[in-house]
Image (spheres, grey):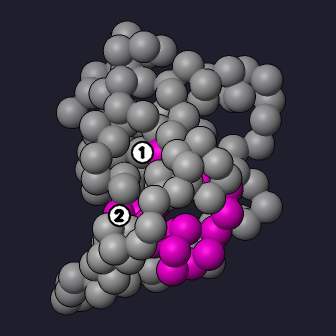
Amino acid sequence: MNKKRSIRAPFFISIFHYFCRSPIDLYSENALMRYLTPSELKEKLDNGEQIQIIDTRDPIKFEECHIDGAINIPQIDLPERVDSISRDIPIVIYCLYGVKSEAPFLYLREKAKFKNVFILEGGLYQWANDIDRSMPVF
């Protein structure tokens, strides 16, 4: 079944809200964008911390390569699948380079009101360069 997809207004509303509100300390819990480096994520995983890792790329790219333990929720499907994400466990979102992770981050923080959300700095590409050099990045 091929369902018609439309651009989701909440992403644009969140981005508008992001650019039109007063600045917040980038290192506070209320920072507009919060990042984890690949090294910080690996350290948390190695320490056994519970983390939800969400790959926002399309399913074909996810099947080709992804971070172990990640689940695939394409950016366009996020509003429909937000109930499958736990609010009790930190969330790390990634895409290929980290840029397209900003809209899902803003959606989860601003619209869905998740508190503990991070973007993987540099995305899967940086993870492959810093942590898993054998990963074929597409």
Q: Residue at x 69, y 28 (%)?
A: 45
User: Regarding mark 1 in the picture, which secondary structure is present there?
Assistant: strand
Residue 92 visible in the displayed image = no
Q: Residue at x 38, y 68 (%)?
A: 18
Which residue matches tag 1?
A: 94
Q: Amino acid at mark 1?
A: Tyr
Specify the label residue 103 is tagged with: 2
Residue 23: x percent and y percent? 45, 59
Q: Amino acid at mark 2?
A: Ala
Q: Residue at x 79, y 61 (%)?
A: 88
Q: Is residue 129 left or right of residue 48?
A: left
User: Regarding mark 2 in the picture, which secondary structure is present there?
Assistant: helix
Q: Is residue 55 left or right of residue 99?
A: right
Lower sequence index among marks 1 and 2: 1
Label 2 Cα neighbours within 10 Å, binned few <14 / some 14-19 / many ≥20: some
Q: Quadrant of residue 127?
A: top left
Q: Quadrant of residue 70?
A: top right
Numbered range of the magenta stretch: 103-119
Residue 102 visible in the displayed image = yes
Residue 19: x percent and y percent? 32, 68
Residue in the foreground of this view, choosing between 112 and 21? 21
